[in-house]
Structures are given as structure tokens and as C-alpha cells.
């Protein structure tokens, strides 16, 4: 797999891709010392700074490691998969199981910590979910997720908020598929309105136990639908 000059464009990305191919394709096995920056730059037809950035990207992917005074060595044949990539491949049921733990605790915290602004946001999100009842499944799911995001935000825990945000893309795809496959909105376009109204009410009232219980019941019912043969 010989190296060759690159076309002009995002040169760092191209250089990274070419070097990664050398590693994952077996041309540079684990333990191999990479050619120096000057040699790589000449082979790829780019500057040393571009090579340096590409090597940093490969190091971030867990493929290479610099050893002071010795050079850069291949340490893995396959890149490490980051959290976002794992979530993209995860089954929605796996995401849901973890979601239950995150959101139930967030609901309890939200009931204790919600501010007047949070109450306004929750009320608006519930109204938005109801307004979306007349829209398609994708818009309805977006409004549903927005309401859940408002509950998580009201917990005022940046870690919980970050975790929920990571789940959203996989969650959104799974929920849209579920609504379409099971036709859950055919008889009730505002599916789940009662439980969401109870959730918002519990958070606004400051009843953490009721908020957690309501949300757990709702999420577990959805998970049961997802796992039903």
C-alpha cells in the first residue's frame, strides 16, 4: 500500500486517513516505528505541520504513541471507538436501560432544584409536546425529547445533562422507529400525554418521589414495548 501525494483539500484529514490505512491495512504492524516527519511529509506531499497534526489525530485514536527520543510507534491495529460511536451502534433497548437510571435520578433532583425559569421551560415543553400531536412522528419525538431534556436541565447537574445529550441521537432514531412500527399514535396522536403531565406536575410541586416514580413507570413501559416479541 504505497503512499502517494495528496490532493489539495482538508490536508490534515487526508493525511490522517492515509496513515491510518497503512496501520489498519497491516503495512505498519503493531510495534513498527513510523518514518520521521520529514519523510512522511515528502511522501504525502504536505508540510511537516500537517503530518504532525495527523499523528496527533492517530494518537488520539489510540493507534500510535510517541516515545521521547525514540520516535512514533504503532501501538494498535484498530482505532479505539469513542463513546459517541458506541452509542450510534447501540441497540435502543440498551440505551433505554441506561436512560432510565439517568433520567429518574434527574427527575428527583429537578423536583428539589427547579427554579422559576425551569418551571416556565417545563410548562412550555409540555405545551410544545401537545402542539406536536398534530405533526408527524419525527416532530412529535423531537417535542417529547425536548420535554425530557427540560426535566434533566432542571436538575442542574452538568454531568447528567451531558450524558442525556449524548443519548439523544440514538434515542431519537429508536423512538421514531418504534412509533412507526407499532403505530402507537394511530389511535392517540398525543400518546403518553397523561404520564408526561404528571411528571411535570410532580417536578413543579417539588415531589421528587412522585417525579421519579412517574418517569420510571413511563420509561419502563416503553422499554417493555421495545423488547416485546
Image (cartoon, grey):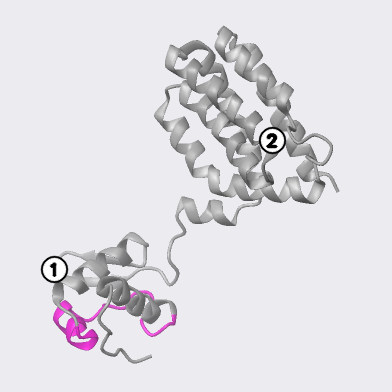
Residues tagged 2 and 1 counted as in contact (Cβ below 8 A): no
Q: Main secondary structure of the magenta part?
A: loop
Residue 102, which numbered label? none
| Badge 2 element | helix
Looking at marks 2 and 1 on the same chain, the residue that comes earlier in the sequence is marked by: 1
At x 60% / y 46%, what residue is drawn? 172
Which is nearer the eye, 146 or 153? 146
Please indicate whether residue 187 sits to the left or right of residue 153 in the image: right
Spatial CA distance of label 2 from label 1 is 64 Å
The residue range painted magenta reads: 25-45
Residue 51 found in image quarter = bottom left
- Mark 2 closeness class: few <14, some 14–19, many ≥20 residues within 10 Å: many
Q: Position of residue 71 (x, y in %)?
A: 19, 72
The residue that disc 2 covers is 133
Looking at the image, residue 179 lies above or below residue 146 = below
Magenta stretch holds residue 104 = no
Residue on which the image places disc 1: 69
Task: Tell me residue 7's x, y (percent).
Answer: 28, 84
Image point (47%, 50%), residue name: 83
Of 7 and 3, nearer the camera is: 7
Identity of the residue drawn at 47% across and 31% down = 160
Amino acid at each position: 500500500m504505497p503512499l502517494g501525494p495528496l490532493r489539495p483539500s482538508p490536508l490534515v484529514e487526508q493525511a490522517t486517513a492515509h496513515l491510518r490505512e497503512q496501520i489498519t491495512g497491516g503495512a505498519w504492524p503493531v510495534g513498527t516505528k513510523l518514518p520521521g516527519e520529514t519523510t512522511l511529509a515528502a511522501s504525502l506531499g504536505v508540510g511537516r505541520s500537517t503530518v504532525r497534526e495527523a499523528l496527533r489525530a492517530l494518537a488520539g485514536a489510540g493507534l500510535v504513541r510517541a516515545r521521547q527520543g525514540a520516535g512514533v510507534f504503532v501501538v494498535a491495529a484498530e482505532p479505539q471507538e469513542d463513546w459517541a460511536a458506541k452509542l450510534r451502534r447501540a441497540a435502543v433497548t440498551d440505551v433505554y436501560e441506561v436512560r432510565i437510571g439517568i433520567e429518574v435520578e434527574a427527575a428527583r433532583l429537578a423536583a428539589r432544584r427547579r427554579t422559576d425559569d425551569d418551571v416556565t421551560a417545563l410548562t412550555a415543553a409540555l405545551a410544545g409536546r401537545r402542539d406536536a400531536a398534530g405533526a408527524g412522528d419525527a416532530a412529535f419525538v423531537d417535542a417529547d425529547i425536548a420535554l425530557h431534556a427540560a426535566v434533566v436541565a432542571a436538575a442542574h447537574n452538568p454531568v447528567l445533562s451531558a450524558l442525556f445529550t449524548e443519548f439523544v441521537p440514538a434515542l431519537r432514531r429508536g423512538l421514531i422507529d418504534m412509533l412507526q412500527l407499532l403505530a402507537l399514535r394511530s389511535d392517540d396522536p398525543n400518546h403518553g400525554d397523561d404520564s408526561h403531565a404528571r411528571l411535570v406536575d410532580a417536578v413543579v410541586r417539588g415531589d421528587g418521589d412522585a417525579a421519579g416514580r412517574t418517569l420510571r413507570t413511563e420509561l419502563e413501559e416503553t422499554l417493555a414495548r421495545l423488547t416485546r416479541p
